[in-house]
Structure formats: C-alpha cells, structure tokens
Amino acid sequence: MMTRRQPTVAEEMAARGVSRRAFLKFGACIGSLLGLGSEAALALGEAIAQARRRSVIWLSFQECTGCTESLTRAHSPTLEELIFDFISLDYHHTLQAVSGAAAEEARLASMKENAGQYLLIVDGSVSTRDGGVYSTIAGITNLQMLEETAKDAFAIIALGSCAAFGGLPYANPNPTGAAPVSALVSGKPLVNVSGCPPVPTVITGVLAYILAFGKLPELDHLGRPLAFFGETIHDRCYRRPFYDRGLFADSFDDEGARKGYCLYKVGCKGPVAYNACATQKWNGGTSFPIQSGHGCFGCSEPSFWDREGGLYGPLPSGQLGDAKTALVAAAVGLGLGAASASLGRQRQQAADADVLRPRKDET
Amino acid sequence: MNHRVHLPLLRESEPPSTGAASTGLAAALLGEITECLAQLADGSGESSIDLRSLPLTDADREELSCVLGRGEVSMTLTLGGDSEIWETAYPGVWWVRHRGGDGDLIGDFIEIATIPRIAVAHRDDIRGSQRRLARWLDEEQRRRAAR
C-alpha cells in the first residue's frame, strides 16, 4: 500500500495562496532576531519552507496560561502567529477543540505516530510533593504526564519561568514541591525560554530555529537561548545614560520619575535580568515595563519572587552599590555599570546552581 | 549650449549637520555599502546589512537616510503586514523595511543587489502560477462551450 507523501510547509501554504516570499520575510525577520547573518537567515526561511509540519505537544501544568496568551494574543496577523502554520499542534488544553478522553487520545496518538520526532513544550512547574498529587490532568499527575510524554520527544522547550525555574509555584514556601522541567527530565535536548511570560517574538524565534535546523540554538549557562538572553535589560535600557550620570527616581511619581530617570532605587532588577524586553518590547513593540515607568522585576531569572529585598527593594549593594556607590557611577560611567552587572552575574550563577536542582525536601 | 538633464529622482541629498547624537556609525556603514557596491559591480555577489542589529541612534538613521535618498523604484509587498522596498538614489542600493500586521517595524535592511531577493518571484510560485492560469483557461473554455 502506498503511503501519501506529507506535503512540505511551503506546499501547504501555497495551497492557501501564500507565496514563498512569506518564508523569505519570515526568515529575514526571525534571523535578525536571532542575530543570524543574511545567508543563514535565508537558509532558515528556506529550511522551514522545505520542512514537513512538526508535531508539537504542549503540556500546561502549574501555570496561569500567560505563556499561551503571550504567543496567541499578539496583534494579528503577525510573525508570532505565522509559527502556528509551521507546526501541527496536536495537544494543548486551552486551544484544542476536543476535551476529556478524546484530548488524551489525541496526545497518545500523536506520541505514537511521531515517536522521536515531536517537539514537547511545557509551561508551568511540576508538583513533586506527595507524589505530585497537587496538580493532575486526566487522572494522572503532571509528573507522570511529563515522564510519559518526554520519553519519546525530539526536544523539550520549558516555556516560561515556571517551567524553566519553578516560577511562582516554586516561591517560598513552595507548598506543592514545584520543580522546573530541567530537574525532572534528563537525556533530552532542553531549552529554557524564561520570562513571566516570555516575549512572544522570543518564543517564535526559538521555535523557528528548532523547526528549521532540527537542533537547539546556542544556550547560556541556564539553558536559555543566548541570542535573546545574552544581555541584561540594563545593558540595553534606554534609561541607562541616567544611571551612568547618577540620576535616579527616588520614589514613584517624584521629579526624577517624571523626568524618566533610572529606576534602580525603586527596585529595578534590570542589571541582573537577562531578557529581550528592552529590544523586542511588548504589545506590538509599543513599550516594556521600564518604558511605562516601572522597574524590571527580573522575571526571567530563577527565584525572582524570593529575591533579597523583594520586588521593590533596590538590588543589594554588593550587586550594584548603595546610593553613594551609585552616585560614583556618574564619575566612572559605563565602567561601573559593566563591573556591577558582572558582579550580579557571578552572584546569580551561584544562586542559579541551586534552583536547577529540586530542594531535598521536595523530592 | 549645454543642456543639463535634471533627473530629480536620482538627486543626492545634502548630508545633514552632524548633531551630538550622531555616533559616526552612518559614515562607517556608507563605507561598507561602497565596498559592497564594488563587489556587486564586479560580480562577486550581493550583500545585506541588518540595520536592527546595529546600535544606530535616530540621528545616525536620519543621516543614512538623507545621504542615500530615494531613487526611481519603490514597491510595497503586502504579506502579513506591508513591506516597503525602495531603491535609493544609488542604483543597486535598496532599503527593505518589513512591517508586521499591526504596522510595527520587524525588519530593516540595506540590500546591495540588482534587485532585492524578496521581490523576485520564486520558481515554485511561478510553476504554481502556470498551473493556476492553465486551470482557469480550461474552465473558461468549458464555460464557453456550455453556453
């Protein structure tokens, strides 16, 4: 019996009246986000055009659906939405039409049919305390579902800070024994796309890279794609010149705040937060928290809820200096900023080593 | 008598005065574009410069735009948001600016090419066009025969 050849993504799109120029545009723009050269960007667009739709299974565990919202609520039609034309989304609680037993059958059927080839996306942390009973789907724990589904996955994307680092459920006292995916799965290519939620173009960029090249992009020491997490928010912040000149807002709505000065003293975590918000921005490139007058929470970093000083306390002096030290920044300019960020990085690396392992009392 | 033919579309703009916010990147880019043009002219290949990957200030961008100016050709690509493509006052140097569906800038490139790659019809699309048009003609013949 002859099996019908699965059409390429380009063939499917052509049948819907979409020309190959769409792939060139997609490749150019996503390649730009990923920092690829023009030839590699061209290759990315061409590779996606020639690929067959890859099956994607999306598991949502202890999460708030913000990660899905980030990707699907972008203004349409956008590059972010185009990615849905390049995959076969076989299982996703919020988006799928079927429910109950039929939904689980769809997941199991896709796992069987695409064994070793499907991409697994997980958003939300995984409950591990008391056998993981604090979060279940279809009668099995999230932990069981993850183990079952990860086994034959081609690669795993831990989407959002909950899946990547535990996120809010992991925050002290972590009643459910929440753990990140990386602490529970081994032997599979895994990329952490952190953020609460992650920037939609970052999600699209990572998905596009994997779909095009069949491998993960280059990662940082926390398993995040370097193209998007290689620089701090502080590094790319448009308010950085005020920091360098020692000009700060002391409280929200004071004169400094109204003049758009640096938000370090009102708790901005930009110097230790690695993410792409300052360049990619949100809501169709409109703005990002700092541009709206609020400091960065550092939501893409491990344990950001439990950070010393809280969400509104300034970074500890060892990381960025106290007010006096910060004023010295006016004299030494970028040098201190770079040195402080480097200090922050070292501290963060030490802290991060802990979060990637589940705590002893949680396993 | 000396008759000078004025070609307004190919005029070069006066370089803007360099303000404090100009970093000198525009001048460096123009040097690179000149080298790329030399390569294109001798058949060594086309080039593309991703402007979003560079820390250009508004003044740098303005300077680049003023020096390059606008040439004879401009196109709009309507595909998931409009893309504007125009040849600058220097034939072979194209500005390709992609926008998303909501109008936000998602790609900004200077391409040094005979024609930007995205403007050229892909061979697969040409084959598809041939099939679709042939099908239309067949159906039209049947419609006429049925009348």
Image: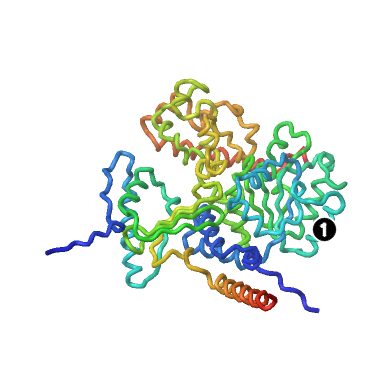
Q: From the top left corner, tell me how far across and down residue A216 is, in percent.
A: 61, 58
Look at 53% across and 32% down and name the residue there: A292
- Residue farthest front in this picture: B147
Placement of the N terminus of chain A among the 4 image quadrants: bottom right
Q: Which residue is drawn at 84% across and 41% down?
A: A133
Query: Could you tell whether A215 is left or right of B37 in the image?
Result: right
- Where is residue B84, by image quadrant? bottom left
**Residue A4 seen by the camera:** yes
Residue B11 point in image, percent of width and height: 27, 56
> In the displayed structure, does residue A53 sit left or right of residue B76?
right
- Which residue is most to the left? B1
Q: In this view, does B95 lie to the left or right of A278?
A: left
User: Where residue A162 sits in the image (x, y, percent)?
Assistant: 69, 41
Q: Is residue B84 shown above or below B119?
A: above
Q: Looking at this view, is A98 or A222 the one in front? A: A98
In the rendered image, the quadrant that contains the C terminus of chain A is: top right
| Residue on which disc 1 sits | A108
Q: Position of residue A243 (x, y in %)?
A: 43, 31
Q: Is residue B49 visible?
A: no
Residue at 52%, 47% (x, y): give it: B103
Q: Going 74% across and 55% down the picture, which residue do you hit?
A: A57
Residue A14 or A326: which is nearer the viewer? A14
Chain under disc 1: A
Element at label 1: helix
